Image (cartoon, rainbow, N blue to C red):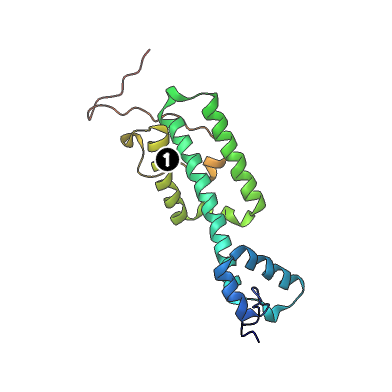
């Protein structure tokens, strides 16, 4: 007579069993949770992890938008601070970034509120400065401390920042203009 243990079901349907599934294979766990929802078998759902995942999904969308805005803002900084580098490639990159952002906002309209959230904007600006320095070679002293435009303005397809105005070399001296 064999004393081997009975075969164990790898993916039990009970809510308690789903917690273990979540730790082992989140993709398979998510598919099982979706199946249970469609079948309206709510008592079997892993509510705790479902709530966590839904919260994380929203944060992920917000982080994705922040990353896209930081890269766009970095390209706009390069456009602004390095007028000699303006070319069709940079213009196309900026246009494509704006289209991607517009699509993300169309798919998730509630993310538009992030564009006006000061803490979110500050994070985007810090990342944009890093991207501008490392990817475009914008000098640190050419970067303003605060973003010179709003995130909504940056996403506007008609907005193209002008080069900053030259500052006079000494107090009381006017910047020279060529006539």
Q: Where is residue 175 in the image (x, y as percent from the top left)?
A: 31, 23
Q: In this view, does 96 lie to the left or right of 127?
A: right
**Residue 158 visible in image:** no
Q: How crowded is mark 1: few (under 14 residues within 10 Å), some or many (20 or more)?
A: many
> Furthest-front residue in view?
1
Asked if residue 87 can be seen in this view, the reply is yes
In this orientation, which residue lies closer to the viewer: 54 or 115?
54
The picture quadrant where one finds residue 96 is top right
**Residue 100 in the image: above or below residue 117:** above
Residue on which the image places disc 1: 131
Quarter of the picture containing the C terminus is top left
**Front-most of residues 170 and 70:** 70
Q: Residue at x 64, y 79 (%)?
A: 15
| Residue 62 lies in quadrant | bottom right
Classify the position of the N terminus by image quarter.
bottom right
Q: Where is residue 16 in the image (x, y as percent from the top left)?
A: 60, 81
Query: Compared with residue 34, is residue 121 higher up or lower down, i.e. above or below?
Result: above
The answer to which quarter of the image holds residue 33 is: bottom right
The residue positioned 62% from the left and 75% from the top of the image is: 18
């Amino acid at each position: 007579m064999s004393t081997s243990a009975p075969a164990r079901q790898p993916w039990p349907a009970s809510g308690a069993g789903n917690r273990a599934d979540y730790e082992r294979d989140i993709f398979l766990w998510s598919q099982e949770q979706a199946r249970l929802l469609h079948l309206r078998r709510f008592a079997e759902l892993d509510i705790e992890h479902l709530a966590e995942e839904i919260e994380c999904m929203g944060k992920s969308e917000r982080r994705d938008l922040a990353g896209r805005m930081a890269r766009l803002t970095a390209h706009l900084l390069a456009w602004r601070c390095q007028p000699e580098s303006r070319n069709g490639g940079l213009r196309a990159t900026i246009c494509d970034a704006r289209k991607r952002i517009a699509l993300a906002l169309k798919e998730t309209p509630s993310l538009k509120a992030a564009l006006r959230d000061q803490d979110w904007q500050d994070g985007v600006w810090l990342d944009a400065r890093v991207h501008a320095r490392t990817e475009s070679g914008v000098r640190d002293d050419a970067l303003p401390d605060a973003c010179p435009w709003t995130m909504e303005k940056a996403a506007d397809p008609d907005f193209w920042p002008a080069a900053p105005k030259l500052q006079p070399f000494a107090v009381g001296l006017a910047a020279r203009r060529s006539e």
